[in-house]
Amino acid sequence: MTTSIQTVEIIIPLYNEAGSVAAFHHQVCTAIADLSYRFLFTYVDDGSSDGTARILEQLQQQDARIRIIELSRNFGHQAALSAGLDASASDADADAVISMDGDGEHPPHLIVEMLAQAEAGYDIVIAMRQEDQQAFWIKRSTSSAFYWLINRIGDTRIAPGAADFRLITRPVLDSLRQFHEYHRFLRGIVAWMGYRSISLPYSPARRIDGKSKFTFKKMFALASQAIFSFSLVPLYFVISLGAIFLLLAFAEGIYVLSFWVSGQQSGLAPGWSSLMFVLLIIGGTIMISLGIIGVYLGYIFQEVKRRPVYLVRRTLERIQPSQSAATP
Ligand code: UDP
Ligand code: MG
């Protein structure tokens, strides 16, 4: 299959990246300077409060290929990415879309290789982060524990290190728009979609400025979104746990009965401690089970409300949308 990619749109979600975005844009422009595609940029400002918006507007004055989408508040990385993807889907001429972080950790030179793979017929090209020695060990170990778990309990295989740095071609972009999930784990959704996909290894570069916007809370939210929207295993686990306790209760019943049958019921000490022990374990199990069921219920509640994933405060369209070879 030969593809005819002409226009490539790059989507970059940003949250308080005032210190990085100008240098980032420059890096990307340098990396793609020799390519003959028509490039477009969509920067999504995810409710930044540090002047990112102002710097983006300055960049737009210098580079007519830039469109800016400002969200009404901070909706999170996956929602910001979705805003960019939706906007690029409405650009009828975008033949391929590349999503990447705006902090410089996703090396722009990979774009060249990604496009080469797309030309070779791949619909999805995923950049795969190699073991990041620079990352803090907690981030590394929680990340590998997460991928280990999601691949054990989920039906969709998600390769460890798969970042949201990837290229998708037009057909994939159009299919992606059919997903209306409120809880989005785009890496999982893309893995679920199929298509012809290939991964490219890369070593993450250093952040240009500032520090990670993924707080522990945000990371935890992303992990639970992935687990609860891609796996029903926690529910089955709880059911099995309940069954095991029932079996134990049954065994204990038989054990106690054996004392009565053999006339040794006096040997049954009034076992307050053992009773409490069992009570606590079962009480705890029921609470955990209810909690897990509650989480799924909460997810269903949020899905049925059909709230928008993000809200756009304003869009600053490209100054000259038809202009193709503007350079900054
Ligand atoms: N980001 C965002 N909204 C958020 C958090 C992060 O748009 O609520 C952006 C951020 O500006 C960056 C990308 O998502 O361009 C990845 O975030 P970050 O670099 O902080 O995460 P890490 O690389 O540490 O996982
Ligand atoms: Mg980063």
Image (cartoon, grey):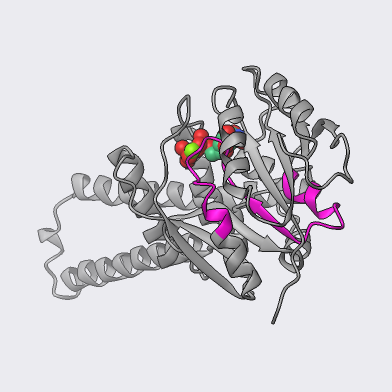
Q: Foreground residue, 252 or 130?
A: 130
**Residue 242, position in %: x, y?**
41, 62
Q: Quadrant of the C terminus?
A: top right
Marks counted in the figure total: 0
Residue 86 on the magenta segment: yes
Q: Look at the image and say whether residue 101 sits in the magenta stretch.
A: yes
The answer to whether residue 49 is seen in the rendering is: yes
Range covered by the magenta-colored residues: 83-112
Q: Does residue 54 lie above or below 84 as drawn?
A: above
Ligand 1's image quarter is top right
Residue found 15% across the figure and 58% down from its top: 268
With 239 as the anchor, is 96 left or right in this view? right
- Is residue 267 shown left or right of residue 256? left
Q: Is residue 325 left or right of residue 1?
A: right
Foreground residue among 60 and 258: 60
Q: Nearer the viewer, residue 300 or 51?
A: 51
Which quarter of the figure has residue 273?
top left
Taking the view exactly as shown, the residue that stands out farthest to the bottom is 1
Q: Nearer the viewer, residue 322 or 274?
A: 322
x%, y% of residue 77?
61, 40
In which image quadrant can residue 173 be found? bottom right
